[in-house]
Image (cartoon, rainbow, N blue to C red):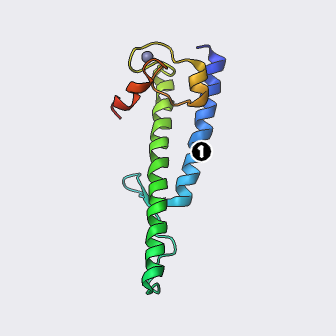
Amino acid sequence: MDKDKLEYFKQKLQAEYARLEHELRDLGVEDEETGEWDTAAGDIDETATEPDELADRVEDFEERDGERKAFEVQLQNVERALAHFEEGTYGICEIGGEEIEEDRLEVNPSARTCKEHIDKESELPE
Ligand SMILES: [Zn+2]
């Protein structure tokens, strides 16, 4: 891949990283010690005594918790892809070592495999 293309995907990933971080900040709080994100309790408070009200709030919490986890996985993928720039391995299929098609990276800049090995991506270690 030429330098301009690499720079282009790097910028895309950095923008994605900033967006995900922002989403996570909206959804939760970062644990200073572990760097992990916890879902903020939001407006759950002691005055919610009606069972329905409590159930609604728990549901809301769980929904946001699910969203947070999805964003976390995406953030991890973006971080991994950015690290590959440092290692000089960005855009290389982690299964077969060939170049990943640019149109695939266009859709998913943190893709770890070429199209041929797309079904093996989920088997890769974290
Ligand atoms: Zn491959």
Q: Is residue 98 left or right of residue 19?
A: left
Q: Residue at x 47, y 48 (%)?
A: 70
Secondary structure of the residue carrying tag 1 is helix
Name of the residue lying farthest toward the front: 52
Vertical placement of residue 53 versus 12, above or below: below
Question: Closest to the observer: 43 or 37?
Answer: 43
Q: Amino acid at mark 1?
A: Ala
Q: Quadrant of the C terminus?
A: top left
Q: Residue at x 38, y 25 (%)?
A: 120
- In the rendered image, is residue 30 in sight? no
Residue 34, position in %: x, y? 37, 53
- In the rendered image, is residue 46 in sight? yes
Q: Is mark 1 within 8 Å of ligand 1?
A: no
Residue 3, position in %: x, y? 62, 16
Residue 108, position in %: x, y? 56, 31
How many discs mark residues in the rendered view? 1
- Determine crowd level at label 1: few under 14, some 14-19, many 20+ residues with C-alpha closer than 10 A: few
Question: Closest to the observer: 24 or 124?
Answer: 124
Q: Residue at x 47, y 73 (%)?
A: 57
Q: Residue at x 49, y 67 (%)?
A: 60
Question: Closest to the observer: 103 or 76?
Answer: 103
Q: Quadrant of the N terminus?
A: top right
Say which residue label 1 marks: 18
Residue 104, position in %: x, y? 56, 24
Tell which quarter ligand 1 is in: top left
Question: Closest to the observer: 90 or 48?
Answer: 48
Vertical placement of residue 50 versus 56, above or below: below
